[in-house]
Amino acid sequence: MCRVGVLTAWTLLLYLAPAHLMCGQAWIPRKGEGSVAVVYQNVAIVDHLNGDGSRFDGGQVQAHGVLTYAEYGLRSNLALNLSLPYIASSYHGDKPHQLPIDNGDYHSTFQDFGIGLRYSFGAHGFAITPFIAGVVPSHGYEFFAHSAVGNRVPELRLGAYVGRQLAPRLPKAYFQVRYSYGITKRVDGVRPNHSNFDSEFGYFVTRRLAIRALEGFQVSHDGLNSPQDFPSRTDYRWRHHDQTLRVNFLNLGGGVSVAVSKSVDVFASVVTTVWGENGHALQRGLSVGVNWNFRSRRAESQVASQELHRVVTQTHTHSH
């Protein structure tokens, strides 16, 4: 049986895209099986991005987060996942959005609830997995601040994963890709819906050790550009710029996972922004976590599948 604890680029960036946490991966747990992951994330932002892609010094943002993610197989091809991040964020610079929240101290709270359903079909190491996922702010936290923990915008995501083991040519390798379309709540007459294209290539160095390359790309289909669409920093539109920007980015990185036992995996990953427009450029997004796989009384009594069903998703990050 193939084993992997997978931390993906789209799920790492808790600070850049909380909705990514809800989308799972191509392989799902079987009926009555599931997993619980606890993930620590450390995010550093130094550069801000203009609408033309140029970078400028708008101050530094540091964030620490703990994500709890749970997934359960309702049927052999249908899985439910839930998640909730807790984030502590601080801003250091001379361009605060709002005081006292941008005073250099850490401010912490829960971010957004996530819930998703995935339906998977396929065979012989190949999987196609459509999904529907939602993000709902856990409460009315402050969104107008460099050190805000999120943008407090509900979002619905629709999309699909495609995953495949590369046997027989590369029996120790796999890949998966994802497309999703995010539908956001309209804010101040603007709805910056966006598409995400993400990919992952993994290789099992040993039966317990896996390494992987990660990519995450987002393109927004609507939204405002900074600074031209915000001529005044005192008007109502500027207060909602984090919720209405046309955020585009390309993130690249890599990760490693180790199967400690039959039911426990540990993993680590790091990504960075190599290109972007509007919002923030991620200097470093580091994630370290542990995943526990379990079987309930509803688990089907059958020989383990050859699919990569032992997967972990955690966290992504808010569109700031």
Image (cartoon, helix red, strand yellow):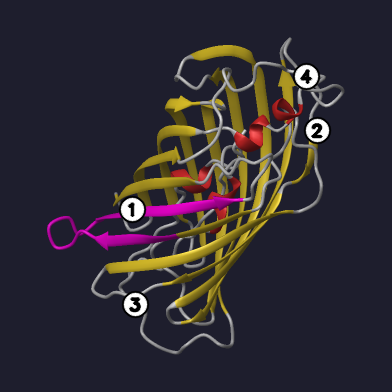
Query: Is residue 170 in the magenta section?
Result: yes
Mark 4 highlights which residue? Answer: 234
Give the mark nearer the N terminus: 3 vs 4: 4
Q: Residues within 10 Å of mark 2 (few under 14, many from 20)?
A: some
Q: Secondary structure at mark 4?
A: loop
Mark toward the viewer: 2 or 4:
4
The residue that mark 1 highlights is 177
Magenta region, mostly helix, strand or loop? strand
Q: Which residue is mark 3?
A: 305
**Residue 181, placed above or below residue 309:** above
Residue drawn at 51 percent across, 65 percent down: 132
Name the foreground residue: 255 vs 156: 156
Q: Amino acid at mark 1?
A: Val
Alpha carbons under labels 3 and 4: distance apart? 59 Å
Q: Quadrant of residue 212?
A: top left
The residues colored magenta run: 159-184
**Left or right position of 247 against 107:** left
Q: Find the distance from the CA under tag 3 to the CA under tag 1.
A: 21 Å
Residue 189: x, y in percent? 65, 41
* Residue to which mark 2 is pinned: 107
Residue situated in front as seen by the camera: 28 or 94: 94
For the residues labelled 3 and 1, say whether their Cβ atoms are less than 8 Å apart: no
Percent across and percent down for residue 202 are 31, 50
Q: Position of residue 166 (x, y in %)?
A: 20, 59
Tag 3, which secondary structure? loop
* Residue 296 image position (x, y, % from top left): 58, 82
Task: Tell me if label 4 and label 1 are in contact, CB under 8 Å.
Answer: no
> Residue at coordinates 80% horizontally, 33% vertically from top-left?
107
